[in-house]
Image: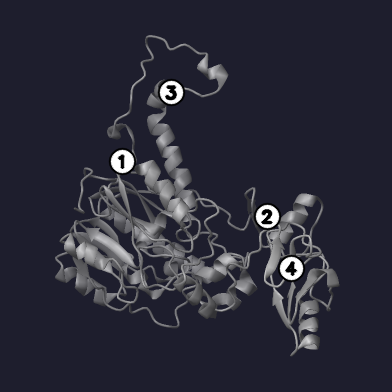
Amino acid sequence: MLRVRCLRGGSRGAEAAHLIGAMVGRAVSGWVSRAVRSTSSSAAALPLTADEPVTEHTPEDCPVCAHNEWDPLEEVIVGRAENACVPPFTVEVKANTYEKYWPFYQQFGGQTFPKDHVKKAVSEIEEMCNILQHEGVTVRRPEPIDWSVEYKTPDFTSTGESDYPIRTVEDRHKLAAQGKFVTTEYEPCFDAADFIRAGTDIFVQRSQVTNFMGIEWMRRHLAPTYKIHIISFKDPNPMHIDATFNIIGPGLVLSNPDRPCRQDYPIRTVEDRHKLAAQGKFVTTESEPCFDAADFIRAGTDIFVQRSQVTNFMGIEWMRRHLAPTYKIHIISFKDPNPMHIDATFNIIGPGLVLSNPDRPCRQIEMFKKAGWTVVTPPAPLIPDNHPLWMSSKWLSMNVLMLDEKRVMVDANETNIQKMFESLGIQTIRVSIRHANSLGGGFHCWTTDVRRRGTLQSYFL
C-alpha cells in the first residue's frame, strides 16, 4: 500500500510524493509501457504487437510496499529541514496551532524559520539518516526546495508578500484570498454598503473599500446599542455586501451560492476552536473530499482514521471506496479539541500493540481490547515548556518510527518512554531531533516508508 504523508512536518510529504513518483517511474517504466495505453483516441488506435503482451504487474515489480508500521524497514524517505518557512497566518493555521504562537505567525508568516534553529534541525536530521543507514536501512532524500517561492493552485496562492502588487484581475484575486486589499489599515475607511442591518445586530465585511479600522470606528460609535459582527465570504473581489448576503426578514437571509459565507468556522480564540470541535465542526467542511494521510494508520488489511481539521468524512469515504475490498477503513475518534494527525494520539507499533495518548483517550478503545489488542499508555513527555513547538505538541514523544517489531527510533531526550519500550522488550535507537520537532514533527512525521519486508495480513478480527 502506497502511503504518502502530505503536509506532515511542513511540506515534506509533498517532497516524498515527488520522490516516490520518480522512483516508481524508473522502476516500472518497462511494464507500464506494455500494460497501460493512453485513453486518448490517438493512442487507442495503436495496435498491440506480438512482442508487447499486456500483463498485470505483481507487487515485486513495484519498489513501494509497506503493509503496516512495524515490519522490517528496508527503505525510507527522510524529509529535509532546509529552507523551512513559516506558514502565513490563515484560518487553517489558526485552527491547528497553539494560541501562544499566533503572534509568531502574524509576524513571520511567509518568512523562513529562525536560521539558527533550522541549522540545528538540519544537523539533527542528517544524524538521523546516518543512524538509519547504520541500522541497515536504505535512506532516500528529496532535493532541497526553496519554500519561500510563491506557489499556487486554482483555489489559492501562498506568498510572503506584504504589499498590494496588482497587475491583473488574477493578482487581485490572489491578494483577496490572502486578506489583502487596496485599502490599507493606516486610517479608518468604510462604505455603508458593506454593512447590513438586523435590528441591534449589524453585519459587515472587510472589503476593497471598508477596512478593519473603519469597522472598529463604527463599533465604538454604535456601542452599546448596536453590535457589529464581522463576516467574510469566498469572494475574490469583495465590495458591497448586499449582492452577497442580504437579510430580507427576521431570521431570513439570502446567501449568494457563488460567494459562500465562511462563518461556519468563526474562530477567534482557542476556546472557540474547542467548542466547535466538540460540536464536530472543523475548518475543513464537507463540500469536497479532503484528507491527509497522516490521519490514517495501518495494521495490514485494517486502516484506522480520524475526522480532523485536515481530513473530512468525504475524504474518508473516497479512501474507503478506492481501497475496498482489500482494505477496511475504521473511523475512530478521540477526546481531542484539536485533532490533526493521528500518530501522536494513537500509534500502532506492533501486531495487536498500540500506544494510546492518555490526554486524548480513544472513544472506541474497548473495540481494540475486545479484539485482544494490548493498549499501552505512554508516559508524559519530558520536553521543556520553553522549547518552541510552533506546529506540534509535546506528545511527539510517542511519534516514533519502528524499524521492526523489536527496534524503535525514539528521541534521545525522552528517557521515560525509552524505559517503557525496554519494558516491552523493544530496543531503543536514540536520536535527538528536538529542533526538528519544532518545525512540525517527530520520527513518524519526518519519514515515509518506501518498503517494509512482510506480507499483507489481518490483525483485527
Residue topped by disc 2? 257
Question: Of circles 1 and 4, which is in front?
Answer: 4
Circle 4 SS class: strand
Q: Earlier in the sequence, mark 3 or mark 2?
A: 3
- Point out the tag, 1 or 2, that comes first from the N-terminus: 2
Quadrant housing the N terminus = top left
- Mark closest to the chain's N terminus, 4 or 2: 4
Q: Residues within 10 Å of mark 2 (few under 14, many from 20)?
A: few
Q: Which residue is mark 3?
A: 33
Quadrant assignment, res 379 = bottom left
Q: Residues within 10 Å of mark 3 (few under 14, many from 20)?
A: few
**Residue drawn at (76%, 81%), measured in percent from left and top?**
216
Badge 4 amino acid: Ile
Residues at marks 4 and 2, CA–CA distance in whole angstroms: 15 Å
The amino acid type of the residue labelled 1 equals Pro
Alpha carbon separation for disc pair 1 and 3: 27 Å
Q: Give the label on residue 325, or none.
A: 1
Q: Which mark is residue 247?
A: 4
Q: Position of residue 360 (x, y in %)?
A: 34, 73
Q: CA distance from mark 4 to mark 3?
A: 59 Å
Residue 408 position, x and y percent, is 25, 62
Q: In the rendered structure, are the residues bearing label 3 and label 2 in contact, judged by CB atoms less than 8 Å apart?
A: no
| Location of residue 417 (image quadrant) | bottom left
Query: Viewer-nearest of labels 4 and 2?
Result: 4
- At x 38%, y 30%, the residue is 28
The answer to whether mark 4 and mark 3 are in CB contact below 8 A is no
Report the mark closest to the observer, 1 or 3.
Answer: 1
| Residue name at image x 35 percent, y 43 percent | 323
